[in-house]
Image (spheres, helix red, strand yellow):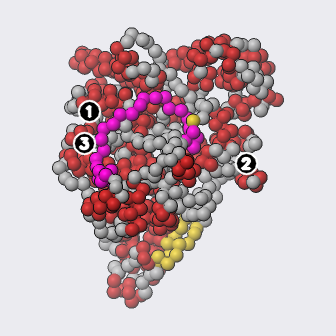
């Protein structure tokens, strides 16, 4: 069994890794403040107010005998958990398991508290936990820094929270907004503040219901039942893999080259804001030198300078990074330079310096490209383009009452709630099953919010709603300029995704397609399987938006066909044993890509020729309705439920020590630890 203390150290450095990547990911966000807000709520979520005893309190009140079972010398696991949760000093540990390994460090105060816990019944433990929970809820509304509430929408949009916990956080954000309105109101806006406050109270009740999902939302709203929202512990990561930062460019060096060649210089704040901007710069530098990607003869590795290490040889500043690459070009000779290039590049020394600058940029982009594209795709796959469009002005407000209540302001409570809840609902972890799991359906709360927004046509910020929910009715409510801008965003991202998919296809996905999209065995391929699935998901989700926007603009959508994800081998065998037929889309995809050589990325990159009739023909040959490949997204409903923590698609207890043990044994991602591989 693995060493819990070692795992705890790994967990600490995992946090450092996430911090480093996250800080460099979203330049438009006030990152430090957002991270401070996220850390506060993460600690609260994993504190005593969210322990497993409270989750089972109602059951144990009726059957207290089932809670008893010796655990490391305690009457039950719940006694050990309470001892850890409420202990005045946790000895710098992160979980019950690690804490109980440090008995030799227990002070007299800790020992006395342990004796007290050991004597308590399970019902007394529940009472203590509930009192502590009520106390923490009271503390949330007083003497807490404003930053912990102000940036809640940002951590939800850019994070991965369960819907019930997203509702819990938004409940407290609404409390904060209401409090600020009451502080800032004046005679001129008193009636507007009153109306907005009434709406907030109504929405808070709906959010309370979502934290329980007990009965129907409509019944709860009409009842007199009063509840506080519940917070359910979650030990899953509260964010996607953060986007890495763009490569560093020495602007003064580049601008000197451009100025000497008599071409416009760069303004970093204007000219280097996206991936395509970096490739435009690379193209400019290579064009000056008379080279391109086909002129690259090799890549030379350069070692990075070593980072500082602590006493245990762990890096303080994130994971060990790959060596950087520098592209080596087949350059022009002196005669060719004089004939084809600007006079500033005629001398071989200056020419070689510019080639080196271009080579470094191409090398860095080659390292950067896959990681950045797959990170971006993970977000687009689940929630469209909202992480790009939901800028701070939609949820932040200065100490100005007009911003809070005016229809001219971009701040709109319902829009914020819908966007945050949609991201959390669409991003829930999928179960390991052979049943279809379609995302994008609206649960009861989202349907309720959308109904309210349709009744407030002018106040709703449809550009935010339309960037996460791709149905024609929503797109029709956006103005033409906004639709054009959103369409351009989705079309532009298709190009880098297409290049990534093409590279993975050539690495071996074509062979996987011959096996009905089965994931290859680990260690037998260079395919980035998780990256392929993220890119395929983002590709298909982008198609839904592109078609919905095009239709609402009265245009025919550009021809883009969907891409199939890879499926785990054990999942496919399970389906075969259960008598399940393969998905209808697989034979169509095989016919198009393998027989007709029509690939989704080939259409976008214009390396293949295809028409709508080709896709319709392939569908008919496979007895599949062409609407499955050429249709539009429809508004759908989905079940409202409490979502549990999952490892590899299987529900696991919301208990840190259990999840820690499972992950240390290799359950997380089926990746065995080195010591286990040696034993095998």
Look at discs 3 and 1 and give the one toward the viewer.
3
Residue at (57, 39) in percent of width and height: 650
Residue extending farthest top: 224
Could you tell me what secondary structure mostly forms the magenta stretch?
Answer: loop
Q: Pinpoint residue 564: horizontal percent, then vertical percent.
A: 42, 55
1 vs 2, front mark: 1
Look at the image and say whether residue 674 sits in the magenta stretch.
Answer: no
Please indicate, yes or no, whether residue 122 appears anywhere in the rendered image: yes
Which residue does the image show at 37% across and 12% down from the upper left? 223
Pick the front one: 660 or 621:
621
Lower sequence index among marks 3 and 1: 1
Q: How many marks?
A: 3
**Residue count near mark 3 (Cα–Cα under 10 Å), binned few <14, some 14–19, many ≥20:** many
In the displayed orientation, state which residue is furthest to the left: 554
What SS does tag 1 mark?
A: loop
Residue identified by numbered label 1:
460
- Which quarter of the figure has residue 293? bottom left
Percent across and percent down for residue 116 are 74, 14
Instruction: Report the Cα–Cα distance between label 2 and label 3.
Output: 56 Å
Residue underneath mark 3: 472
Q: Position of residue 667 (x, y in %)?
A: 64, 44
User: Whole-percent x and y of residue 255?
Assistant: 38, 66
Question: Taking the image as drawn, is residue 498 in sight?
Answer: no
Bounds of the magenta span?
A: 625-650
Give the alpha-carbon distance from disc 1 to disc 2, as whole Å.
53 Å
What residue sits 40% from the left and 75% below the top? 292
Nearer to us in this view, 371 or 142: 371
Please say if the residues under marks 3 and 1 sit with CB atoms less than 8 Å apart.
no
The residue beneath circle 2 is 312
| Relative to 346, residue 639 above or below | above
Question: Marks 3/1: CA distance?
Answer: 16 Å
Is label 2 in a helix, a strand or a loop? loop
């Amino acid at each position: 069994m693995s060493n819990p203390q070692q795992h705890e150290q790994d967990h600490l450095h995992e946090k450092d890794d996430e911090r480093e990547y996250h800080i460099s990911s979203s330049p438009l966000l006030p990152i430090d403040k957002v991270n401070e807000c996220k850390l506060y709520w993460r600690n609260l979520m994993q504190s005593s107010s969210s322990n497993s005893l409270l989750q089972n309190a109602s059951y144990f009140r009726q059957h207290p005998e089932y809670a008893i079972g010796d655990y490391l010398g305690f009457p039950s696991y719940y006694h050990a958990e309470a001892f850890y949760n409420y202990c005045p000093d946790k000895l710098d540990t992160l979980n019950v398991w690690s804490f109980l390994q440090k008995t030799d460090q227990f002070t007299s105060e800790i020992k006395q508290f342990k004796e007290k816990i050991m004597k308590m019944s399970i019902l007394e433990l529940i009472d203590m936990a509930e009192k502590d929970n009520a106390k923490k809820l009271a503390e949330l509304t007083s003497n807490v820094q404003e930053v912990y509430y102000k940036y809640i929408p940002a951590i939800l949009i850019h994070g991965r929270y369960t819907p019930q916990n997203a509702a819990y956080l938004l409940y407290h954000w609404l409390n904060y907004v209401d409090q600020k309105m009451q502080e800032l109101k004046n005679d001129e806006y008193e009636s507007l503040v009153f109306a907005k406050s009434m709406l907030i109270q109504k929405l808070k009740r709906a959010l309370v219901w979502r934290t329980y999902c007990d009965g129907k939302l409509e019944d709860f709203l009409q009842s007199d039942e009063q509840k506080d929202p519940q917070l359910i512990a979650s030990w899953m990561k509260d964010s996607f893999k953060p986007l890495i930062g763009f490569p560093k460019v020495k602007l003064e060096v580049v601008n000197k080259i451009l100025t000497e060649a008599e071409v416009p210089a760069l303004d970093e704040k204007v000219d280097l804001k996206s991936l395509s901007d970096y490739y435009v710069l690379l193209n400019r530098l290579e064009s000056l030198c008379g080279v391109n990607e086909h002129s690259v003869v090799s890549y030379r590795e350069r070692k990075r300078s070593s980072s500082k290490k602590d006493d245990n040889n762990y890096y303080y500043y994130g994971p060990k990074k790959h060596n950087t690459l520098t592209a080596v070009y087949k350059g022009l000779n002196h005669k060719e330079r004089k004939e084809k290039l600007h006079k500033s590049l005629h001398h071989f020394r200056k020419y070689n310096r510019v080639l080196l600058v271009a080579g470094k940029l191409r090398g860095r982009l080659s390292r950067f490209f896959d990681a950045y594209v797959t990170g971006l795709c993970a977000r687009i796959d689940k929630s469209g383009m909202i992480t790009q469009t939901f800028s701070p002005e939609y949820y932040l407000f200065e100490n100005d009452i007009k911003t809070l209540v005016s229809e001219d302001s971009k701040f709109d409570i319902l829009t914020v709630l819908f966007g945050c809840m949609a991201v959390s609902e669409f991003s829930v972890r999928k179960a390991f099953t052979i049943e279809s799991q379609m995302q994008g359906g609206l649960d009861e709360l989202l349907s309720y919010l959308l109904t309210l927004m349709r009744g407030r046509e002018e106040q709703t910020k449809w550009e935010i709603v339309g960037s996460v929910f791709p149905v024609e009715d929503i797109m029709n409510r956006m103005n033409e300029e906004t639709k054009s801008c959103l369409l351009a965003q989705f079309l532009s991202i298709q190009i880098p995704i297409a290049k990534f998919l093409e590279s993975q296809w050539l690495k071996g996905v074509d062979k996987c397609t011959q096996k009905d999209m089965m994931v290859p065995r680990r260690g037998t391929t260079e395919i980035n399987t998780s990256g392929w699935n993220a890119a395929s998901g983002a590709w298909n989700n982008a198609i839904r938006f592109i078609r919905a926007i095009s239709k609402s603009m009265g245009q025919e959508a550009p021809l883009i066909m969907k891409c199939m994800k890879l499926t785990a081998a054990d999942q496919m065998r399970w389906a075969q044993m259960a008598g399940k037929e393969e998905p209808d889309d697989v034979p169509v995809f095989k016919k198009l890509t393998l027989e007709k050589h029509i690939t989704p990325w080939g259409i976008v990159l214009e390396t293949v020729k295809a028409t709508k009739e080709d896709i319709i023909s392939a569908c008919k040959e496979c007895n599949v309705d062409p609407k499955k490949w050429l249709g539009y997204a429809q508004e759908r409903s989905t079940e409202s439920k409490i979502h549990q923590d999952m490892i590899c698609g299987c529900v696991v207890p919301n208990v840190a020590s259990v999840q820690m043990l499972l992950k240390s044994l290799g359950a997380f991602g089926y990746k065995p630890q080195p010591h286990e591989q040696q034993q095998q």
